[in-house]
Image (spheres, helix red, strand yellow):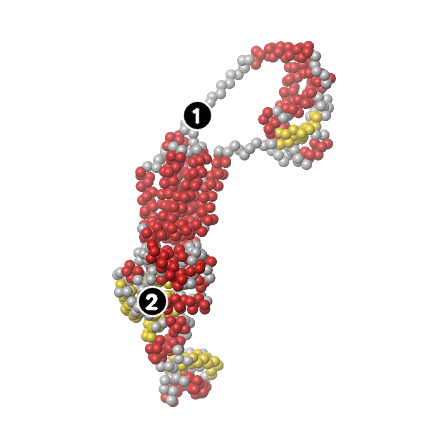
Amino acid sequence: MRFALSTLVKDLARWRQDKSAILMWIGVPLLVGGLVTSLVDGDGGGQPSGLLLIADQDASFISGLVVGTYSQGELGEMITVEKVSPADGRARIDAGEASGFLLIPEGFGEALLDSKPITLELKTNPSQTILPGIIAEVTEVLLDAGFYANRMFGEEIALIEESASADVAPDSAIVAAIAVSFNERVQSAAPLLFPPAIDLTIAEPPPETPGVSVALLFMPGIILMAVMFAASSLAEDYWAEREAGTLRRLVFAPSRLPAFVAGKALAATALITALAVIVLFIGFAYHGVSWGRLPLSIAWIALSGLALYAWFGVMHLFLPSRRSASLVSSMVTFPLLMVGGSFFPLAALPDWIASIGRLTPNGFMADRLTTEVTSASAVTAVTGSATSIDALSWLVLAVMAGAGLLLNLWRLNAGFARA
Amino acid sequence: MLEVENLVKQYGELTAVEDVSFAAGAGTVFGLLGPNGAGKSTTIHCISGLLKPTAGRVAVAGFDVVAEPRQARQALGVVPQELALYEDLPAIENLRYWGKAYGLNGAGLDDRVREVLTHIGLGDRAKDLPKTFSGGMKRRLNFGCGIVHKPRLILLDEPTVGVDPQSRERLFDMVLQERDQGACVIYTTHYMEEAEKLCDSLGIIDHGKLIAQGTVDELRAELGARDVLQLSGRFPDAETAQAVASLIDDGLDDLEVLAAEDDSMTLALSAGSQHLPRIFAAISEAGGAVTETSLKSASLETLFLTLTGKELRQ
């Protein structure tokens, strides 16, 4: 036992020298988790914004209303309006400096009131996709609104336009007349508008009980991916020891191989546990998972890491060269990650793949961790069933780890350490 | 301290070590001398327990390495031919780790590690990583890791391969110091001068067989102080060698033809330089011609040549 602890301390000291590997192990889940979270939980990457150049040659009350409309409400948050001369506007839209250029010709207001045809010039930036479309749509809606407003309130608008053109405050009698006229027209339209001809009922979907963040469903698989990468690297250290000659030197010492295997396994478990603590802490904090679930989750990942390390060790010790061991290790790892819920949560996979995935070592581990970090009822709501970290699960992992480590020891004794 | 009796190691049809027997006592350096592939390392691996002998017996400090491996290994310190260090662990931690592997702990371990660091001349580099060391420093640390538990038998398998002269001298001092402190050292090498300098007794091994053993003086006496004459040139038929051998009847009583090929001939004889003209004449009369001559005075190297008919470093 004492030599196992010495080996643990020795390996931790050696790994401390390899800071890049440790950063990679921690960085992979944080990076992948961050990307997944930003994709599935994010706000879509923010709102587009653009510049609309307007040359208002009419400079009337009505053309002012049109210009002002682009700066109102949510439209105003997307579009910045800048008044320009026609020449400047054309030059700048041709240079691609704005999302659109709108020319309101002289006589626009009068033409609208007199219901005479008039042409507005709208030029959009072909290198942009969203904002020019919005500007074109808004402009068309504005013109339609103007047409119908003129049909309903043409006389009143003409009076307002006249007062605005005179640049004097309208007479009180005129304001009162306009107000009365507006009221009468609305009153006459009321039977058509109230109550509405179509009764729209909005059916609210029932609240999701309990709510599960999709990104949270990804978390266990991503953590298991990091654990698998770390376990594979840690197991490859058998080759590093053999190539350094230290394994052979160990054979000269009296009966130290069992303690050596135990010590290396302890070191691997300690490193994987540290990885689990960091990643789970961040994941729990971000997703608001109950801290009470943290200790069991850490313990589960620690034992999972030990079991994976032991079997990656078997893979490395039984293959004839370091290169072939690394290759086979990668060839095994990636399909396991794919099926075992690391690239997509098991809940998102087709049932038949998910069934296979739950039988893989990492799928078995991720499935139970998912239940732990969410909750059994939440997982049941999504997947139809949930598997908790029960006594049998612990036993399966313990047997898996123990059997793997015994095979490690057997292979070292059988010649790997002596070569 | 070490007893090797009728040791045999076979790999299928190949016999790497054949019926080797020797013994070495405490406070002595025993050299195992032979060319590459002669069977030195296989013998060492059988002693260290790395290989299981096919037949024969090896006992370290009275313990059979097969029947009582734990006790035998506790008494044994191995300095392998290749470096066996943790390059990413400070020198002092390397020593501590290997000390613990042999059961040292606490103050005893700390004292011994300090002692070894001084002994191998790395006291001021104790906390540095071996990957920053020169080749010679790594060799010294490799030696230190093998002796940190104060073994009674130390196996050194060609420890000076690739070592600069200064580090080699330092290594010799360390070996002799261990011997003076009562350890038995088994030293394999294919450098004759190392064997002559360090070893109290020697075993010469070739093709897996121990072909001579004894103290350096005993082996020299066995040679009979003859010189070794190596000739290159043209020696067309067996008649040339016979013509040279006939000189034995003509007064060169201790002349011996060790090897004869079409283009080379190796002879052993006393006072070789005085008899060169007669030998050249005999070769010439038999139709041969000498183009190059090398005369080596009596030494362990010439003994090896006498015994095997080939250079030690071949």
Front residue of A183 and A176: A176
- In the rendered view, does A129 fall on the left or right side of A344? right
Q: Residue A167: where, in percent of width, then height? A: 72, 18
Structural distance between the alpha carbons of marks 1 and 2: 84 Å
Q: Residue furthest bottom?
A: B250
Label 2: chain letter: B
Contact between marks 1 and 2 (CB within 8 A): the answer is: no
Can see residue A348? no
| Residue count near mark 2 (Cα–Cα under 10 Å), binned few <14, some 14–19, many ≥20 | few
Residue at image mark 1 = A207
Disc number at residue B181?
A: 2
- The answer to which quarter of the image holds residue B196 is bottom left
Q: In the rendered view, tell whether residue A235 sits above or below residue A347.
A: below
Q: Please, what is the three-letter code of the amino acid marked with disc 1?
A: Pro
Front residue of B120 and B310: B120
Q: Residue A376: where, in percent of width, then height? A: 37, 32
Q: Secondary structure at mark 2?
A: loop
Can see residue A376? yes
Is label 1 on the same chain as label 2?
no
Q: Residue A263: where, in percent of width, then height? A: 35, 50
Query: What is the quadrant of the C terminus of chain A in the image?
Result: bottom left
Which residue is at a point 58% across and 32% down the rendered structure image? A48
Front residue of A331 and B122: B122
Q: Please, what is the three-letter code of the amino acid marked with disc 2?
A: Gln
Q: In the rendered view, tell whether residue B82 sits above or below residue B281.
A: above
- In the rendered view, does A68 fall on the left or right side of A381? right
- The answer to which quarter of the image holds residue A100 is top right
